[in-house]
Image (cartoon, rainbow, N blue to C red):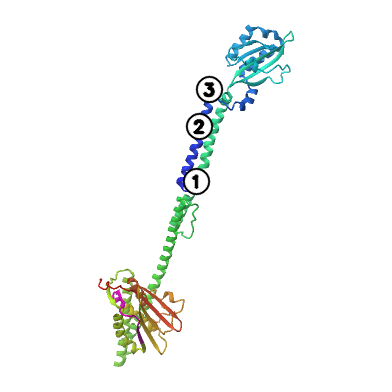
Amino acid sequence: MSIRIKMLLSFTGMLVISLLFILLTASLYTIAATGDLQGFRDIYKVHYQVNPLTEQGEAIFQEMKFMAKNSPDELQNKVLLREFDMKLRAEKSGLYVRRENNPIFESRTFHQPGLGQALPSYDLSNNQIRSTFNIGERFYAYAKFDFQYSDEKRGSIFVIRERSPFAELTRKLLPVMSLLLIGVLVIANLLLFRWITRSFIQPLHQLRSSAEQIKNGHLSFELEPASNDEVGQLSEAFESMRQQLQRSNELRQQDEVSRRELISNISHDLRTPITNIKGYIEGIRDGVANTPEKMESYINIIHSKAVSMDKLVDELFLYSKLDLNQEPFVFNPVDLVDFMEDSIEELRYDLEDKGVVLAWHNRTSGSAVSAVDPDKLKRTVVNIVDNALKYMDHEDKRLSIILEAHQEWNTLIFRDNGKGISEEALPHIFERFYRAEQSRNSSTGGSGLGLAIARQIIDGHGGLIWAESKLGEGTSIHIQLRRLEKGKHNHD
């Protein structure tokens, strides 16, 4: 349920409850003012049977009751009865006195012809001296006392008050109902406040607490949405943000570790040739190279180490530019068949000198055109071939280069019969400065940037590169470049 609906239901509920109590209160005020509400008067008969008269009217009744017991004949004096009636009128009541079945006195307050017939019969034991009766739609409460005159005739005095079924009770209940209305409104507000607090405020407090944890750098917690409303959606978005921050923090830490490893690897790979160069120079300076042959050997070694350092710096500079997307690519439609044949022709003599048998397999049915940067793609080919040569440990060294053309991709496969790569190392060979041989011996491995540069170049072409290998059987490097359709060969 959304917060909007919760708020709507809350205020609608408050409005309905308030209106109901306002209507009830208004009805009670109406009853108190008009003294009339039909249909429910019997509910209140018991109340008026117990309290039919006002306090002053009850006092007058008690006085006449005392007179009926001690001097009943005086209750036939109409002048006296009229005085009592005048007092009762002030209390909105009236007097009715009868002797046997004949009325002696009837107050003008009633104007009710059927009053005598509606009154109860004689009960000289006076078991019930207060009660109510109806005449049509009119409702009366009374107090009565039955007695005997001195001549043994039966007599009765009635102090009667016309009442509404609700009028007097309403006047008494109105303060209670008002307080009850206030109490219900307060309780309803508290309940609604608790409902809104549990569904809205508490989740916001949880979000604030989570934000403070993130501010303090604590990301290893989980925020579970408590509902499916807007606050729940906000919690889900906040949790997604936390996960992204946690991943970013982990990547930052990994980058920091990689940065330290990079500095360490660069330092190691530069320190070794520099140390060698210093050693041979010191040998020349100290006269160790005392023959022309030794001198030439020392100079050749120094030159070789300097070339190795220059190549490392060049590869590092190229990788950095590729990694920062600062190395421009110049793409041209190139037929990979012709490109690979030219590249293999350049590599063949060097490979033959190293005793490597090179096999070229063109499995295309015609041309295999892709949009490539020829210089950078050639750099990729050279890096892959150099990497293969470094790990060939068989006497019979073989390298196969295969070109296949498919509907969407042109695929180059470089397959060697070297010692292969372990399953643990295989996913990492395209990472910078990674070597499957962890000793970083320059005689068995290069800078560790060759395959990383190859991956950056192929990624820049929008292609794919991956490796497959088995220990003792060799390694295959696969490159896929998107094939150009006919009619698109002339685009820049």
Q: Residue at x 67, y 18 (%)?
A: 120
Residue indicated by mark 3:
34
Q: Which mark is residue 197?
A: 1
The answer to whether 26 is drawn above or below residue 277 in the figure is above
The answer to whether 293 is drawn above or below residue 381 in the figure is below
| Image side of residue 278 versus residue 55, left or right | left
3 or 1: mark nearer the eye: 3
Element under disc 3: helix
Instruction: Please say whether residue 212 is visible from this viewpoint.
Output: no
Which residue, as the protein is rendered here, is positioned at the far right?
Answer: 152
Please tell me how crowded label 2 is: few (under 14), some (14-19), or many (20+) other residues with Cα within 10 Å: some
Whether residues under marks 3 and 2 lie with C-beta atoms below 8 angstroms apart, the answer is no
Please tell me how crowded label 3 is: few (under 14), some (14-19), or many (20+) other residues with Cα within 10 Å: few
Q: Earlier in the sequence, mark 3 or mark 2?
A: 2
Residue 121: % across, % down:
69, 17
Circle 1: residue type: Thr
Residue indicated by mark 2:
22
Q: Which mark is residue 393?
A: none
Question: Nearest the camera: 457 or 367?
Answer: 367
Residue 175: % across, % down:
55, 28
Q: Earlier in the sequence, mark 3 or mark 1?
A: 3
Magenta stretch: give its range. 358-377
Circle 2: residue type: Ile
Question: Nearest the camera: 9 or 388?
Answer: 9
Instruction: Please say whether residue 219 is visible from this viewpoint.
Output: yes
Whether residues under marks 1 and 2 lie with C-beta atoms below 8 angstroms apart, the answer is no
> What whole-number distance in Å separates the C-alpha atoms at marks 3 and 2?
18 Å
Circle 3: residue type: Thr
Whether residues under marks 3 and 1 lie with C-beta atoms below 8 angstroms apart, the answer is no
| Image side of residue 56 versus residue 243, left or right | right
> What whole-number distance in Å separates the C-alpha atoms at marks 1 and 2?
27 Å
